[in-house]
């Protein structure tokens, strides 16, 4: 009973039942429509044939009387056709004709009206099996003679029988096709759906590595499974990132919190002077600010990744942002003894948020100032900011001559709280590159970390500095913020010549 209920509740069974009911109703309607219209058309033709025969016999009767009428009917009876004739005398005796039996109530109506009757053909016994259908007209002639002219309807009855057989065969065929359709849907499509449901259930139970089956035939189920697998990959990546963030928060924030707690406990145990107490509070306040900044950075990264920063992408000149940010950091670099240079090879126009892009560039410059110093003391640290572009992209490059980042760590270093061993001596939380990557992703761009001493696409581990490249798509429709493509092309040719 449970299996039957499950079968009846399946979509395949419901679809098969709906299609079967719909086509059955349509088929019955078409059968009735065709049968009635065909029957009406054939009846009209039969009536016309009967009336034509009556017209011919009437002419013979007018010319030769009852004897001529009898001769004419006898001649027509000998001709092989479906016409029916009968002449009766005043006593009801048959004079001539090809009808063996006709009910008395039919013969009593002799006003020439169309009548549909059952009769027994000449030469057959009067039984129900020998009964046939006919359409007749009966006239009463002078001298109480009666003339019947009609036509057998065997062809029409046979046609109706054929249509009925065709309808029966069609309905049986539809039932068979509905069963085949149900079998196909149940065995193929619903099996795929069951597999998807089972895989989804396993994933919901905690198997995040599970994926939906893809058969490779490219149908809608494969496309659905592929899209869901991409979504599951993203969810698994986010869950792993959440776990790493949780671990990193517990690891990186435990130390300053423990240090703050120890400092407070020590201050409570000791009788500190006013200046010592104030110094302790100031140190605690500094570490508290660092913790707040870390959480603010986390919240900002989360908002940027979720696209809920309230940022409105507008058509902006990337060169203006680069100029403004670099003007702020040039004095800082000069005070630190860093050679700072800026090169604007192009003036690309992009769709972006000025504040977020400025924050990303500022983070990259700060990273270069903190970690981009040469390992050899006799080499002067340098930072180069280069803005270039092509027909499709704007490329912002920040390059230093420090120790760089190994190729194996370049992808990992963009995760939250990841700090390489060589940079742990410097202050920071390991969230700068995470924020930069989130901002670039929001702008449909790409963050590339390569070695400054090799080509952009090189994977060499040669440590000769780090080149961080932000690649952003151009706003083709508004190059030069309304200056037109001609002005843009002139500026590009001028820069290329120089």
Image (spheres, rainbow, N blue to C red):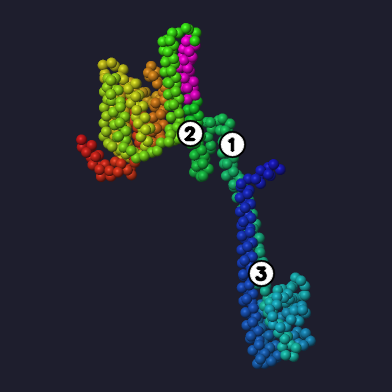
In three-dimensional space, the C-alpha distance between marks 1 and 3, rounded to whole angstroms, equals 57 Å
Question: Which residue is outermost to the front?
Answer: 274
Name the magenta segment's main secondary structure.
helix
The mark closer to the camera, 2 or 3, is 2
Q: Secondary structure at mark 1?
A: helix
Closer to the chain start, of discs 1 and 3, is: 3
Whole-angstrom CA distance, mark 2 to mark 3, is 70 Å
Query: What residue sits 56% from the left and 33% below the top?
Result: 203
Position of 28 compared to 402: left or right? right
In this view, the residue in front, 403 or 445, is: 445
Q: Residue at x 65, y 57 (%)?
A: 172
Q: Secondary structure at mark 2?
A: helix
Q: Which quadrant is home to the N terminus? A: top right
Q: Position of residue 237 (x, y in %)?
A: 48, 30
C-beta proximity under 8 Å, tags 2 and 3: no
Tell me if mark 3 has few (under 14), some (14-19) or many (20+) residues whose alpha carbon lies within 10 angstroms of its own. few
Viewer-nearest of discs 1 and 2: 2
Give the mark toward the camera: 1 or 3. Answer: 1
Q: Is residue 278 visible?
A: yes
Dividing the picture into quadrants, the one containing residue 439 is: top left
- Residue 463 visible? The answer is no
Q: Which mark is residue 198?
A: 1
**Over which residues does the magenta segment extend?**
245-267
Query: Which label belongs to residue 404?
Result: none
Determine the image quadrant of residue 210.
Answer: top right
Q: Which mark is residue 158?
A: 3
Q: Which residue is mark 2?
A: 234
Is 375 inside the magenta-drawn segment? no
Above or below, 194 against 254 in this view is below
């Amino acid at each position: 009973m449970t299996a039957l209920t499950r079968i009846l509740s399946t979509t395949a069974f419901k679809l098969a039942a709906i299609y079967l009911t719909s086509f059955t109703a349509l088929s019955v309607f078409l059968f009735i429509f065709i049968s009635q219209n065909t029957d009406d058309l054939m009846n009209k033709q039969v009536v016309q044939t009967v009336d034509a025969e009556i017209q011919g016999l009437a002419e013979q009767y007018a010319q030769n009387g009852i004897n001529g009428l009898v001769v004419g009917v006898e001649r027509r009876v000998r001709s092989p056709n479906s016409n029916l004739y009968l002449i009766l005398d005043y006593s009801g005796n048959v004079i001539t004709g090809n009808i063996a039996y006709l009910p008395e109530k039919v013969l009593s109506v002799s006003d020439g009206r169309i009548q549909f009757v059952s009769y027994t053909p000449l030469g057959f016994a009067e039984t129900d099996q020998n009964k046939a259908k006919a359409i007749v007209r009966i006239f009463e002639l002078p001298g109480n003679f009666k003339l019947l002219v009609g036509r057998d309807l065997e062809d029409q009855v046979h046609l109706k029988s054929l249509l009925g057989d065709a309808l029966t065969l069609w309905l049986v065929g539809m039932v068979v096709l509905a069963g085949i359709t149900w079998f196909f849907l149940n065995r193929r499509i619903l099996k795929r759906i069951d597999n998807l449901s089972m895989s989804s259930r396993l994933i919901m139970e905690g198997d995040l590595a599970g994926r939906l089956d893809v058969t490779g035939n490219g149908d809608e189920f494969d496309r659905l499974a592929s899209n869901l697998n991409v979504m599951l990959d993203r969810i698994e990546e986010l869950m792993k990132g959440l776990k790493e963030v949780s671990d990193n928060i517990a690891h990186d924030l435990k130390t300053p919190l423990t240090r703050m707690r120890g400092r407070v406990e020590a201050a409570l145990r000791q009788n500190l002077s006013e200046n010592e107490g104030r110094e302790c509070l100031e140190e605690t306040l500094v570490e508290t600010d660092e913790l707040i900044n870390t959480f603010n950075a986390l919240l900002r990264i989360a908002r940027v990744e979720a696209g809920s920063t309230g940022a409105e992408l507008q058509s902006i000149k990337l060169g203006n942002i680069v100029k403004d940010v670099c003007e702020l950091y040039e004095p800082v670099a000069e005070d630190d003894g860093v050679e700072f240079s800026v090169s604007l090879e192009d003036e690309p126009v992009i769709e972006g948020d000025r504040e977020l892009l400025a924050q990303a560039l500022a983070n990259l410059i700060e990273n270069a100032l903190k970690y981009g110093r040469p390992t050899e003391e006799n080499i002067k640290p340098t930072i180069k900011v280069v803005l270039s572009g092509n027909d499709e992209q704007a490329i912002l490059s920040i390059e230093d001559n420090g120790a760089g980042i190994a190729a194996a760590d370049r992808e990992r270093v963009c995760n939250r709280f990841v700090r390489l061993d060589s940079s742990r001596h410097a202050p920071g939380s390991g969230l700068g590159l995470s924020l930069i990557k989130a901002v670039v992703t929001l702008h449909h761009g790409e963050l590339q970390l390569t070695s400054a001493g090799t080509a952009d696409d090189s994977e060499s581990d040669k440590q000769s500095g780090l080149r961080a490249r932000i690649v952003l798509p151009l706003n083709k429709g508004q190059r030069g913020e309304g200056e037109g493509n001609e002005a843009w092309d002139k500026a590009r040719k001028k820069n290329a010549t120089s």
